[in-house]
């Protein structure tokens, strides 16, 4: 990461580590019911919940696993906030098996940003961070996110039914996992 805080750049994106001062951006992002549709059924996240629950967890990842974490995405040309990405191992998983994730503002949908950021993070995981496998998941009915995973090079692995505290529309169809092993990525 350079002195300006840039973690990664692509042709159109700049990704930087998330900070506590990003709480208002996260609240703005999570206030759109369509953004939250497949996460909470459209229920927004309060500023208090962002500050006391989500941000502390987001900020913990690079402390446990250097190189990984949550990253605010800006459009390089305009500096506009687009959303966030994460590349991080699960708490109970090996550090070399990170999960890829993203949450973008609706205005950024359909423009290839999610795919562009995902591909760059996958490449970084395999070339710089020593990942053996990268995986991602979403609700089975979330076709937009599934397309991003496929365009980023991940392949469908399985459908599963998690034990979620709240059922939301479409959850009866389960969740899906997509993944890519380093050996497949090299091809």
Image (spheres, grey):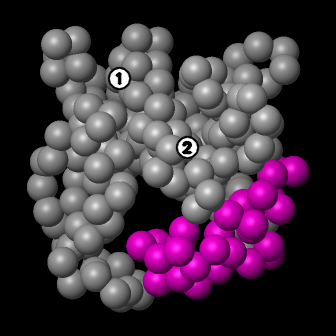
Compare residues 125 and 150 and report the one nearer the observer.
150
Q: Residue 29, position in %: x, y?
A: 68, 64
Task: Give the residue at x 77% y 14%.
Answer: 2
Q: Which mark is residue 131?
A: 1
Answer yes or no: do the residues labelled 1 and 2 have beta carbons within 8 Å? no
43 is higher (above) or lower (below) than 96: below
Compare residues 10 and 110 and report the one nearer the observer.
110
Q: Residues within 10 Å of mark 2 (few under 14, many from 20)?
A: many
Q: CA distance from mark 1 to mark 2?
A: 17 Å
Which quarter of the figure is the N terminus placed in?
Answer: top right
Task: Give the residue at x 46% y 51%.
Answer: 110
Point out the stretch of residues depicted in magenta.
Answer: 20-48
Q: Residue 142, position in %: x, y?
A: 32, 66
Q: Which mark is residue 85?
A: 2
9 is higher (above) or lower (below) than 73: above
Task: Give the residue at x 31% y 44%.
Answer: 149
- 160 left or right of 97 in image: left
Which comes before the other along the chain, label 1 or label 2?
A: 2
Q: Is residue 180 magenta?
A: no
Q: Residue 107, position in %: x, y?
A: 62, 57
Residue 12 in view of the camera: yes
Task: Give the residue at x 63% y 74%.
Answer: 32
Q: Which mark is residue 165?
A: none
Front label number (1 vs 2): 2
Q: Residues within 10 Å of mark 1 (few under 14, many from 20)?
A: many
Compare residues 102 and 96 and report the one nearer the observer.
102
100 is higher (above) or lower (below) than 142: above
Task: Name the secondary structure under disc 2.
Answer: strand
Q: Residue 127, position in %: x, y?
A: 40, 11
Which quarter of the figure is the C terminus placed in?
Answer: top left
């Amino acid at each position: 990461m350079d002195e300006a805080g840039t973690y990664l750049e692509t042709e159109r994106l700049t990704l930087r580590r998330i900070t506590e001062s990003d709480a208002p951006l996260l609240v703005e992002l999570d206030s759109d019911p369509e953004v939250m549709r497949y996460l909470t059924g459209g229920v927004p996240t309060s500023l208090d919940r962002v500050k006391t629950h989500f941000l502390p967890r987001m900020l913990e990842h690079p402390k446990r696993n250097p190189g990984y974490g949550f990253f605010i995405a800006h459009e390089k040309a305009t500096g506009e906030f687009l959303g966030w990405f994460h590349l991080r191992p699960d708490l109970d998983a090996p550090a070399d098996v990170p999960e890829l994730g993203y949450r973008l503002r609706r205005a950024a949908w359909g423009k290839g940003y999610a795919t562009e950021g995902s591909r760059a993070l996958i490449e970084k995981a395999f070339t710089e961070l020593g990942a053996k496998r990268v995986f991602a998941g979403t609700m089975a009915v979330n076709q937009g996110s599934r397309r991003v995973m496929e365009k980023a090079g991940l392949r469908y692995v399985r459908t599963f039914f998690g034990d979620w505290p709240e059922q939301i529309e479409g959850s009866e169809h389960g969740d899906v996992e997509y993944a890519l092993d380093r050996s497949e990525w090299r091809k």
